Amino acid sequence: MKRQFDKSIYTSISLTKLTIVAIYQIVNNGEEAAYERVVKECFSLFPKRFSFQRYPEWPDGHRIEMEIMRCRDKGWITGNEKISFQITLLGKRVAQEVLKELEEGKSATPPKKKSQSRDRGDTIIGYLKTSEPFKRFKHDKENFNITEEEFRRLLVATFETPPRVLKQNLIHCLDTCEQYREKELYEFLKECERQKSILLKTYMRREK
């Protein structure tokens, strides 16, 4: 039977650290860390952190995908959705440290005065605001430019991600910015869309 961790402990640990624990557990079990398998493991181990707010019985795949990308950015894993993910030595060390926190029954992370939001919209807004392209956009809008790699990373996508998914992710981010009244973020995404419209052309043509 899969171990159930104490939700009062794991809710105070970052989503990225919980994700690397899930990947570590999969690899330790001798399994391939494919995207779908990682989604299942994250939700099974930490359901309160990786579920939809309105539908807690379902895993939030998009949120988990974002955290997988963050694990890769930190050098904790390598690979992609097409060839699955491999954990690095650094990733194993981090996962073991987090597991120790979970097993000791206390988190090394000091509790926050404000409870952590599990809202998907908050996660997306925070992710966009801390991205390097947005920081450059704020600094110099007139001369702003974004590469294809940055654009795909911004949309939590790889070079294998098809135009249809790119467009869907972009629309979702734009809708979220409108909902949260983040005008500057919305303007930033529209500029990115304008510059990289050719990447979305295939999907847009099918829509007609």
Image (cartoon, helix red, strand yellow):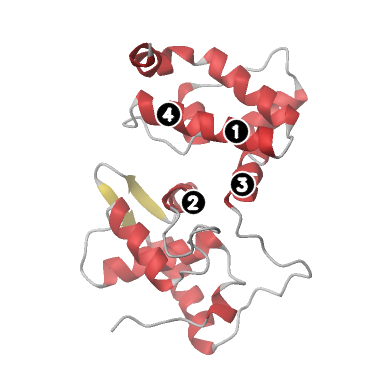
The quarter of the image holding the N terminus is bottom left
Picture coordinates of residue 38, whole percent (x, y): 34, 59
Locate residue 64 relative to residue 143 in the image: left or right.
left
Q: How far separated are the C-alphas under marks 4 and 2?
A: 15 Å
Q: Earlier in the sequence, mark 3 or mark 2?
A: 2
Q: Residue at x 48, y 86 (%)?
A: 103
How crowded is the residue under tag 2: few (<14 C-alpha within 10 Å), some, or many (20+)? Answer: many
Q: Earlier in the sequence, mark 1 or mark 3?
A: 3
Evaluate if marks 1 and 3 touch, with contact meaning CB atoms under 8 Å apart.
Answer: no
How crowded is the residue under tag 1: few (<14 C-alpha within 10 Å), some, or many (20+)? Answer: some
In this view, 61 is above or below 132: below
Q: How far separated are the C-alphas under marks 1 and 4?
A: 14 Å
The kind of secondary structure element at disc 4 is helix
Amino acid type of disc 3? Answer: Gly
Evaluate if marks 3 and 2 touch, with contact meaning CB atoms under 8 Å apart.
Answer: no
- Among the 4 quarters of the image, the one containing residue 188: top right
| Label 1 sits on residue | 175
Locate residue 115 relative to residue 119 in the image: left or right.
right
- Among the 4 quarters of the image, the one containing residue 10: bottom right
